[in-house]
Amino acid sequence: MKYWNPLLWLILLLPFGCNPAKRLTGPKVVVVWQPSHQTDTGKDFSEAATCNAIVEAAMATQSGRKEYKVWSLGKTEYHHADSGSNTKIQHTSALIEGKISGYAYELQESNKLKPRVFISVHNNGGTRRNAVWGYIHYGDKYEADNRELAAHLVKAICEVSGMENRGVLLDSTTGRNDYRCAATGKLSFYSLDEQVNTAPYRVLLEIGDNAASRAILTDPAKQKLIGEAIKKALVEWMNTK
């Protein structure tokens, strides 16, 4: 070659050395939120209402990125659109009377948006703990990154709410119901399964207990505080990638 400019070649080759899943800064990065659509959780308690309030508060906190919410609540064209478990085949992947589930609809809508980050927000029940848990999917190549993200989000929530930090758990360890990941054969959360959800970074948050944390979860001021804390922690983590 007559002319050799190493800087030019570096510029030309740089994109090929980048991992697209790691580039998490900039306005083109898409974040999808999935608040619980469950209205049958606890006496006089709507998990859908509390989780949606937290998600709305998070989304209202500006980040300079594209954000969307996927939610099946009230959509009667889907089965289990306002109830069901994220770990039960009948409530997630089953076709009932020609209808897909609310969970399946939410994940289809999310995948259309091609998000880099997917955050599902739920409340726990029956634990007797005023606490926060983070869940990640077992066995895919982003497990370590997702553990880091989940830990960062759980810590932030606990700091503003006073709830106990119960750490990050694998979805394969819950022992709940019967939905399994096709790749590993292990029990899984449908929303976190990489066979279902194409986002590389996927976290499910169990924020509080519908009995032990009721006062916090139903307080609009606390909901706003938690949502803002989640967004701040998310942006901090994304800026390190």
Image (spheres, grey):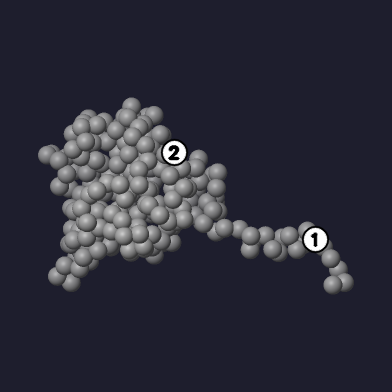
Q: Would you name the residue on which mark 1 appears?
A: 6
**Residue 20 is drawn in which quadrant?**
bottom right
Q: Residue shown at 22%/56% (left/top)? A: 178
Q: Would you name the residue on which mark 2 appears?
A: 152
Image height of 46 relative to 137, above or below: above
**Secondary structure category for the residue under label 2:** helix
Q: Residue shown at 29%/33% (left/top)? A: 131
Task: Find the distance from the CA under tag 2 to the CA under tag 1.
Answer: 40 Å
Residue pushed farthest right? 2
Q: Type of residue at label 1? A: Pro
**Secondary structure category for the residue under label 1:** helix
Residue pushed farthest front? 185
Q: Is residue 66 left or right of residue 52?
A: right
Picture quarter with the N terminus: bottom right
- Nearer to the camera, 47 or 152: 152
Name the N-terminal-most of marks 2 and 1.
Answer: 1
Q: Is residue 236 left or right of residue 228?
A: right
Image height of 31 relative to 218, above or below: below
Q: Position of residue 34 (x, y in %)?
A: 32, 51
Q: Type of residue at label 2? A: His
**Residue 181 is drawn in which quadrant?**
bottom left
Q: Is residue 63 left or right of residue 184?
A: right
Q: Residue shown at 57%/58% (left/top)? A: 19
- Nearer to the camera, 142 or 29: 142
Q: Residue shown at 55%/44% (left/top)? A: 240
- Mark 1: few/some/many CA within 10 Å (<14, 14-19, 20+): few
Q: Position of residue 17 (x, y in %)?
A: 64, 60
